[in-house]
Image: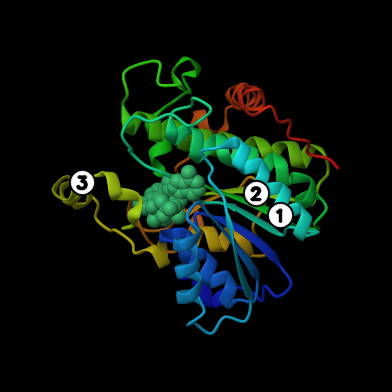
Amino acid sequence: MWTKKDIPDQSGKIVIITGANTGIGYETALALYEAGAHVVLACRDLEKAGNAVTQMRESEGTGQLSIARLDLADLNHVAEFAAHFRSKYSKLDLLINNAGVMLPPATCTPGGFELQFGVNFLGHFALTAHLLPLILATENSRIITVSSGAARQVDHIDFSNLRLEKPYDAQYSYAISKLANLQFAFELDHRLRNSGSSSVSVAVHPGVVYTDLQRFIPGDILETAFAQFSQVSEAWQGALPTLYAATHPDVQGGDFYGPDGENEYSGYPALSSYITTAMTDSLQAERLWEFAEQATGLKIRSTN
Ligand SMILES: NC(=O)c1ccc[n+]([C@@H]2O[C@H](COP(=O)([O-])OP(=O)(O)OC[C@H]3O[C@@H](n4cnc5c(N)ncnc54)[C@H](OP(=O)(O)O)[C@@H]3O)[C@@H](O)[C@H]2O)c1
């Protein structure tokens, strides 16, 4: 039963967590701050981020907390965030690609991509691309990408429907974005291994967790939907797979962690058995990679 109390001292580590003002990101940031890390909360709303920091400072954290504005829907903004970060910091031990949006009304990003694909995947792809030189320059650094069990609902990415070309199916698009998160995390690790880097890429899913993620689901429907799960976690528990992947010394690049309870809905961190063929299909991952490089205009270089 690994919990945040088991996190080793994180003093001296610099961490970015996207979407850290609430939910799983908030609990991840709090735990790493308590363990001594310097945590940068990368959030789209600075007021919410400021309130989160005020609340976190009430705990007995020994680290540091900073906030920076990051809107993952806007690739220009991702570039600005990364440039600002690089001008202030000379290393990055942990990049936690956590932010997410689920089941919003049909919306496109400024670049014309379906919002969930744009924020959950493309924004994080761009963020990682911009920050990778710094990550590679940091010995034993880790990139953690938060996916979802929903990724199992689809077996490939339909590249002709990432800009809302076809009738909108919010759940399908969410699942696509989360499959993309996994294909990205595993392919990134593959490339890091091939280049002999000490940096690793690790994927996680939090199980089923009550958070603001369900904000677009009407209350009665949410109640019915959650009733089908034997267990539902609170955010602190949903953060455990991320925290384990980020800090446990035994973690290997390419690992995938989730909760260890029934059907991986809740519990304590363990290797996930959610893996499907599509998640680890290298041909699919390479196609996604090329698509993302073209869409963002960025090349991810796995060597410095
Ligand atoms: N909760 C679950 O049951 C569950 C299950 C599987 C996977 N997950 C994954 O876990 C991760 C965290 O979700 P959560 O449950 O903690 O949800 P949450 O409480 O809604 O937190 C999501 C965070 O992402 C931020 N965000 C949304 N759009 C953004 C954008 N365009 N740019 C930057 N940040 C943005 C939100 O900011 P605002 O507060 O400003 O909106 C918020 O800080 C997500 O990747 C989600 O897909 C959650």
- The answer to whether residue 141 of the structure is visible from this angle is yes
Q: Nearer the viewer, mark 2 or mark 3?
A: 2
Give the amino acid type for the residue marked by disc 1 in the picture. Phe
- Taking the spot 51% from the left edge, 38% from the top edge, the residue there is 73
Q: Is residue 236 above or below residue 132?
A: below
Marks 2 and 1 in Cβ contact (< 8 Å)? yes
Cα–Cα gap, marks 2 and 3: 37 Å
Which mark sits nearer the N-terminus, 2 or 3?
2
* Residue 111, percent from left and from top: 53, 27
For marks 1 and 3, the one nearer the N-term is 1
Seen from the viewer's position, the closer of residues 79 and 4 is: 79
Q: Would you call the spot at circle 3 few (<14 residues within 10 Å), some (14-19), or many (20 or more)?
A: few
Asked whether the viewer can see residue 207, the reply is no
Front: mark 1 or 3: 1
Residue occupied by mark 1: 85
Q: Element at badge 1?
A: helix
74 relative position to 150: left or right: right
The x, y position of residue 295, in whole percent, is: 61, 24
- Tell me the amino acid under the disc marked 2: Phe
Mark 2 vs mark 1, CA separation in Å = 6 Å
Q: SS for tag 2?
A: helix
> What residue does disc 3 label?
225
Pinpoint residue 10: horizontal percent, then vertical percent. Answer: 67, 72
Furthest residue toward bottom: 60
Location of mark 2 (residue): 81
Of 4 and 121, the residue lying toward us? 121
Work out which quarter of the rendered image holds the C terminus and state it: top right
Q: Could you tell me which residue is drawn at 57 percent across and 80 percent down? A: 61
Residue 243, above or below 149: below
Query: Is disc 2 in contact with disc 3, using a CB cutoff of under 8 Å?
Result: no
**C-alpha span from label 1 to label 3:** 40 Å
Residue at 55% over, 37% down: 74
